Amino acid sequence: MSAHRRLGLAAAAALLPLAVAGCSGLGRSAVGTITYETGHEVEVTVTSPSVKGCHRLAPAGATRIENETLVDVVLYPTRDCRGPSTYVPSNSGNSVVPGTLPWRSYTVVH
């Protein structure tokens, strides 16, 4: 193998980790699980949700949540992450106040 080719392979090998690191933020997720109970008393578990965007909960909404991820979440009573919100820190939980609307969506704080 020529010296020029070995140099090219060495340079490519050195740049590959940098290219992968540069793209790694594209699919970032909240490591862990979010478990919630719907208005119909069904338990739903979401594993490592994306840190980007608004996430919808089950159509019946959620009345109780356990945030067992490494990040905090914000819950909303609407399907589009708008309106009054409830902040739920990492590794904690919360329940809706009786007589109030269930949560229908959430965002991840990152």
Image: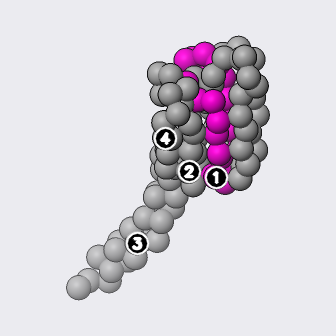
- C-alpha span from label 1 to label 3: 37 Å
Please state the horizontal and vertical placement of residue 42, each as a whole percent of the image.
Answer: 48, 36
Compare residues 43 and 55 and report the one nearer the observer.
Answer: 43
- C-alpha span from label 3 to label 4: 43 Å
Q: Residue at x 63, y 30 (%)?
A: 63
Foreground tag (3 vs 2): 2
Is residue 93 placed above or below 19 in the rendered structure? above
Whether label 4 touches label 1, CB < 8 Å:
no
- Dot 3 or dot 2: first in sequence order is 3
Is residue 63 placed above or below 35 in the rendered structure? above
Residue type beneath disc 4: Val
Residue type beneath disc 2: Thr
**Could you classify mark 2 by the number of other residues whose Cα lies within 10 Å: few (under 14), some (14-19), or many (20 or more)?**
some
Is residue 30 placed above or below 95 in the rendered structure? below
Compare residues 15 and 56 and report the one nearer the observer.
Answer: 56
Q: Say which mark, if any, is on residue 13.
A: 3
Q: Is residue 93 visible?
A: yes
Please state the horizontal and vertical placement of residue 110, each as a whole percent of the image.
Answer: 68, 42
- C-alpha span from label 2 to label 1: 5 Å
Q: Secondary structure at mark 2?
A: strand
- Dot 3 or dot 4: first in sequence order is 3
Residue type beneath disc 1: Glu
Q: Which residue is mark 1?
A: 68
* Residue range of the region highlighted in magenta in the rendering: 61-81
**Could you classify mark 3 by the number of other residues whose Cα lies within 10 Å: few (under 14), some (14-19), or many (20 or more)?**
few
Q: Which residue is mark 4?
A: 44
- Dot 2 or dot 1: first in sequence order is 2
- Dot 4 or dot 1: first in sequence order is 4
Q: Secondary structure at mark 4?
A: strand
**Residue 86 appears left or right of 58:** right
